[in-house]
Image (cartoon, rainbow, N blue to C red):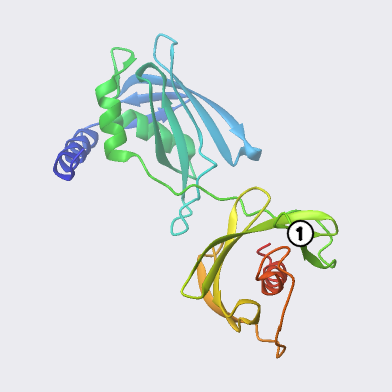
Amino acid sequence: MNRVLLFFVVLMYSLTAVCQEVDYKKGMIQVDGKDYAKVEVKKENFGLTKTFTVYNMAGEKIIIAAPALEFEQDKSDNTILYYRVTFLTANQVGIFKVPSLSQEKGFAKLIGQSGIVVNDKVDESKVKELIAAKSASPTVAVDYTMVKRNRAWPVRLKEDKTIEQESIVIGSFKPTGSRDGMDSYEFILPSAVVVAKVSFTGGNNAKNIEVFTLKDNFKRMVPFDDGHTVIASSAGIDKNQIILDRIAKWLMEKNYL
């Protein structure tokens, strides 16, 4: 959908919504004083979140809405939650913002103002308009949970490129390229989530390493010069295994690995 068409869809949807008065009482959505749809509410997470099942006036299940927990909440606005809304009879799904307080009324307003229920059915074209005008595109949340272990034990690199602590695999490393004397690697949790990307020159004698940590989206230069010069080392694990070992320990100490 091009931008001009999307603009007119949003404009027409907004004008339509303004003309409708939506109320929510005792599980019933009312639009302009008339019963519009029934809502069944199920409390979850000690009442902090709720799931909604919407029925038409004939008792047919037409919409299911549940918190979309796999998405990151908007850090600039803690007053909303993301909900996945499935329009059953229209075979459509959208992600929408619902107020974290008064979730039921906020959801009822979203559905009531949409005009998607026509003759006790969900109108497919109106659902598409609603998704175009009101749906959100949040970022998928990444789980950076680390492996439980005794963090006092030394960190060791293994020949299969895994990283162990107390014989427990806490992550792995992967070479991602070498160009003009600069070597690059990724450090990865056992869950396959990349936690850090590093680049450096000088091999095992690298003095300053560019470290980008994805958890906090932060890039910085980290000094690794300990005053010792590596003359030769075994390359059984990796040609840069000495500096990689030190990087892995730094990531562990900084709670990235």
Residue shown at 21% from the left, 40% from the top: 10
Q: Is residue 189 left or right of residue 111?
A: right
Residue 174's place in the image compared with 31, above or below, is below
Residue shown at 38% from the left, 45% from the top: 137
Q: Is residue 89 left or right of residue 16?
A: right
User: Which amino acid does the dot numbered 1 rest on?
Assistant: Lys
Most foreground residue, 228 or 219: 228
Residue 64's place in the image compared with 81, above or below, is above
How many marks overall? 1
Most foreground residue, 182 or 37: 182
Most foreground residue, 118 or 141: 141
Q: Is residue 8 left or right of residue 213?
A: left
- Residue behind mark 1: 158
* Residue 176: % across, % down: 53, 60
Residue 225's place in the image compared with 81, above or below, is below
- Look at the image and tell me whether residue 38 can be seen: yes
- Look at the image and tell me whether residue 21 can be seen: no
User: For the C terminus, which image quadrant?
Assistant: bottom right
User: For the N terminus, which image quadrant?
Assistant: top left
Q: Is residue 150 left or right of residue 143?
A: right
State the SS at label 1: loop
Q: Residues within 10 Å of mark 1 (few under 14, many from 20)?
A: some
* Residue 172: % across, % down: 68, 57
* Residue 120: % across, % down: 33, 13
Residue, far bottom: 227
